[in-house]
Image (spheres, rainbow, N blue to C red):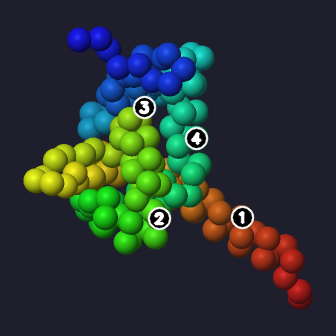
Amino acid sequence: MSPKVMPGGLPHPDKSTILEYAYGIKEKGVAVAMLPLTPEMIALVAERFKALGEPARLRLLHALREGERTVSELMEDTGLSQANVSKHLQLLHSLGFVTRRKEGLYVRYALADADVFALCDLMCGRLQAETEARRELFAVS
């Protein structure tokens, strides 16, 4: 069986490989020290950030925060078409953001883990701080 290859021909490491490479791992998965990133690792990270740069994918991930969903349920939750939901789920699955399992006639999707929301929460906090700073800057005394 040949190893998975990502777009661009890079090997497709599993999540633990990426974490072990990029960070010194302490007990319970807490990152303690970032190692220098190779061009290959930078490409892997950029690919994942690019995937998160699409609002439709963020909507799907947000809907999956509530638990497993089928494509039909995700269509209802997000208002996206079946083709769009399927296309985005395929990419999210290939990058390890979501898992899928067959249940009868349906495929159920779920978050691989909730770590992605740490990034979202970080960015939302930053946006809130920037908004508050702008309000204070333009506030009339």
Name the kind of residue labelled 1 in the image.
Answer: Glu
- Choose the circle earlier in sequence order: 4 or 1: 4
Above or below, 30 relative to 58: above
Mark 2 to mark 4 CA distance (whole Å): 20 Å
Residue 6 percent across, percent down from the top left: 45, 23
Residue in the foreground of this view, choosing between 112 and 6:
6
- Disc nearest the viewer among 2 and 1: 2
Q: What residue type is labelled 2?
A: Leu
Q: Can residue 15 be seen in this view?
A: yes
User: Farthest residue in the bottom direction?
Assistant: 141
Residue 82 shown left or right of residue 42 in the figure: left
Rounded to the nearest angstrom, the CA distance separating label 3 from label 4 is 25 Å
Identify the image quadrant of residue 4: top left
Return the residue at label 4.
50
Image quarter where the C terminus lies is bottom right
> How far is the residue under mark 2 from the one under mark 1?
30 Å
Earlier residue among tags 2 and 3? 3
The residue shown at (86%, 77%) is 138
Residue type pointed to by label 3: Val
Circle 1 residue: 130
Element under disc 1: helix
Locate residue 105, reporting x and y percent. 15, 54
Where does residue 132 sit, x and y in percent of width and height? 71, 73
Q: Which residue bears the numbered disc 3?
A: 32
Q: Which element type, helix, strand or loop, lies under badge 2?
A: loop
